[in-house]
Image: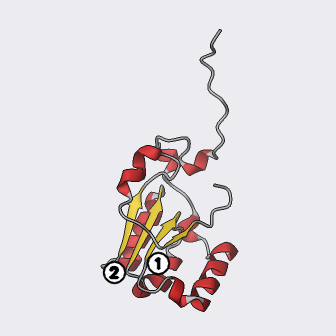
Amino acid sequence: MESDAQPPSLFPSDCGAPFDLKPENTITSWESLPTSPAEVAVFDFLRSEQLQWRQKRLLHVGMGNSSLAETFAAGLAEYVGITISLPEIERFKSKLANAGNAHVIFLNKYDPRMYPKIRGDFDVIVDTSLKS
């Protein structure tokens, strides 16, 4: 006999999982936090390996406080950040409003229905959120 019970979610509830975003899933605190040690390590790598990213397309999964975009967007062909956090989007817009090569997409990375919103190929993909 088949059960209608759903398996327990594998994703944290504050990551917008499993798919449909509800208001409680669209507010995080990352935009107000300092740059994480994981992201600092990515910054260090990017600074030491500029040929790996200069004038290339970078996809940033979970853009947090926008410090990666602020630091590196000017040297990129294009920066695309994705997030489920409406406050992160507002911070990004306030910090990078004039950056023609930097864009943000409201997108749940767990939801394959959203993948068509991400267009083209990327040379660099950054995701430093260990919980996801």
> Mark 2 touching mark 1, by CB under 8 A?
yes
For the point 41% across and 78% down, the residue is 95
Q: For mark 2, does the 10 Å Cα neighbourhood hold few (<14), some (14 to 19), or many (20 or more) residues?
A: some
Relative vertical location of residue 69 with respect to residue 4 in this rendering, above or below: below
Of residues 57 and 73, the one nearer the viewer is 57
Residue 69 circle label: 1
Q: In the image, is 84 to the left or to the right of 99?
A: right
Q: For mark 1, does the 10 Å Cα neighbourhood hold few (<14), some (14 to 19), or many (20 or more) residues?
A: many
- Amino acid type of the residue tagged 1 in the rendering: Ala
Residue 64 rendering spot, x and y as whole percentages = 54, 68
Relative vertical location of residue 15 with respect to residue 69 in this rendering, above or below: above
For the point 31% across and 81% down, the residue is 98
In the structure shown, which secondary structural element does the residue marked by tag 2 occupy? loop
Figure quadrant of residue 56:
bottom left
Residue 116 rendering spot, x and y as whole percentages = 37, 52
For the point 50% across and 68% down, the residue is 60
Residue 22 circle label: none
Q: In the image, is 37 to the left or to the right of 15?
A: right
Figure quadrant of residue 57:
bottom left
- Amino acid type of the residue tagged 2 in the rendering: Ala
Residue 34 rendering spot, x and y as whole percentages = 62, 76
* Residue under numbered circle 2: 99
Of residues 14 and 102, the one nearer the viewer is 102
Residue 126 rendering spot, x and y as whole percentages = 56, 69
Relative vertical location of residue 32 with respect to residue 132 in this rendering, above or below: below
Of residues 2 and 20, the one nearer the viewer is 2
Name the N-terminal-most of marks 2 and 1.
1
Please, which residue is most extreme toward the top here? Answer: 1
Relative vertical location of residue 119 with respect to residue 72 in this rendering, above or below: above
In the rendered image, which quarter contains the C terminus? bottom right
